[in-house]
Amino acid sequence: MDLKQEIRSFTPIDIEKLSQEKNVSENVVDSVKGYNKAIENLRTGSEDIAMIELKKVVSVNPDFYDAVNLLGLCYAYTNQIDKAQELFSRVADAEVDSVKAAEYLNYIGRGSASGKSVGSSKTVKSEAKPQKPAPKTKYAKPKQASNEEVQAEYILLRNLGLQLKKPSVAITINILSVICLVAAIAVFMVNYKNTNGDNGPDTVVNTELTAKYNKVVAENEKLKKDLNAANFQLKQVQLSSQLSQVSTLYGQYKYIEAADKLLAIPEKDLSADNKKKYDSIKANVLKNAANQLTIEGTSLYNKKKYKEAIQKLEKVFTLGTKWSFGDKALYTLGKSYVAANEPQKGAEAYNRLISDYPDSAYVKYARSRLQSLQ
C-alpha cells in the first residue's frame, strides 16, 4: 500500500451542500471545514499543519471517522505506528468505515511485525537471486486467507457480537433455548412412559421429570414476561425520543413539522410518564401549527395558488376544530374552492363558518358569497 497515495485519495466535503441540509449543527460544519483545510495542507506537503487541524477536528467530533482515518494515515506515514493503530482500532470498532480501518490496521501490522518502516522512508531494491524451485512434497500447504477474507470475517464476527449484546436478542435466545429444552423433556417423558408404563418404581422417575418440566415451563413464562417488559421499556425510550424531537421542532418554530411528528406517535402505546409529556405539549403544538397553516394558506390564496391553499387550509381542521382563527381559515377556504372552480365545496365551507362561528365578523361576507353562488 502506498500511504502517500492513500492520503491523497481523501477528498474535501462540499461545505455549501452540507450547510443546506437540515439539522446540521455549526459544530459539524466547523469540523468539516477543518477537515478540508487539512486535506489542502496535505496536498501542499504541509503534513504537520494538516495533523494539527485533524487533531482539533477529532477532539471535537470523535465520530468523524473520515477524519480519524486520515489522521491515522498521517501517523502511519510519519512512522507513529502506535498512534495510528489506536485510531484505526477506534474506527474498526464503530459501525461505519470499518473495512478501510481494518485494511489499514492489517497493513501497518504487517509492517511493524517485519521491522520495516511503513511511512515515508524509501525502500532499497535488492537484486533478486535466482532460487531453486522448492521440491515437490506429497501434501500441499493449506492456502492462507487473503486480507479481504480476514477483514470480512472480522467485520462479520464483530457485528454478530454487537447483535448478541442487545438485551432483546439475548432474552430471545434464552427463550428459544428454554423452549428447546422443554420440548426435549416432553419427548423424553412420552417415550419413557410408553416404554415403562405407569406402575412400579418408574412412577417416581416420572414424578421427578414432571416437576422439572413444570419448573422449566415456569421459568419460560418468566422469561417471556421479562422479554415483554424489556420490549415495552425499549418502546418507551423510542417514544420519549420522538417526543423530544417534537419539542425541538417546536422550539425552532417549525410548528407544522412538530405537529406531523406528534400525531404520528401512537398515543395508546405511551406509558404514564410519556403520556403526561405528550399531553403537556399537544395543545400548543397543534394550535400553533393550525395557525401557521392558516397564514400560509391565506398567502397562497393571495398568490392565486388555490389548490395549494386548499391543502393547507383543510389541514387546519384535521389538527382540531373551533380554533379562534378558524373563521378566517374557513372563509379563505371557501374563496379558494370557488376560485378553483369547486363552488359546491366553497359553499360547504361558508355554511360551516356560519354554523360554527355565528358571532364572527366573517359571517356576513360568507352569506353574501353564498347568495352570489346561487
Image (cartoon, helix red, strand yellow):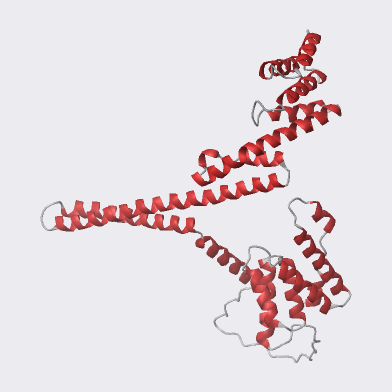
* In this view, 374 is above or below 227: above
User: Residue shown at 57%/80% (left/top)?
Assistant: 141
Identify which residue, 353 or 228, lies in the foreground.
353
Residue 209 location, quadrant: bottom left
Horizontal and vertical percent position of residue 229: 44, 51
Identify which residue, 197 or 311, lies in the foreground.
311
Question: Exactly how many numbered labels are in the figure?
Answer: 0
Q: Is residue 311 left or right of residue 168?
A: right
Horizontal and vertical percent position of residue 263: 62, 38
Horizontal and vertical percent position of residue 35: 80, 67
Residue 125 location, quadrant: bottom right
Identify which residue, 192 or 102, lies in the foreground.
102
User: Residue shown at 71%/26% (left/top)?
Assistant: 326
Identify which residue, 352 or 284, lies in the foreground.
284
Q: Is residue 355 left or right of residue 126?
A: left
User: Residue shown at 33%/55% (left/top)?
Assistant: 219
- Taking the view exactly as shown, the residue that stands out farthest to the left is 200
Tell me the quadrant of the picture where the C terminus can be found: top right
Q: Is residue 11 left or right of residue 140?
A: right
- Taking the view exactly as shown, the residue that stands out farthest to the right is 44
* In this view, 75 is above or below 305: below
Tell me the quadrant of the picture where the N terminus can be found: bottom right
- Asked if one can make out residue 259 in the rendered structure from this viewpoint, the answer is yes
- Taking the view exactly as shown, the residue that stands out farthest to the top is 374
Horizontal and vertical percent position of residue 373: 79, 10
* In this view, 248 is above or below 91: above
- Asked if one can make out residue 148 in the rendered structure from this viewpoint, the answer is no
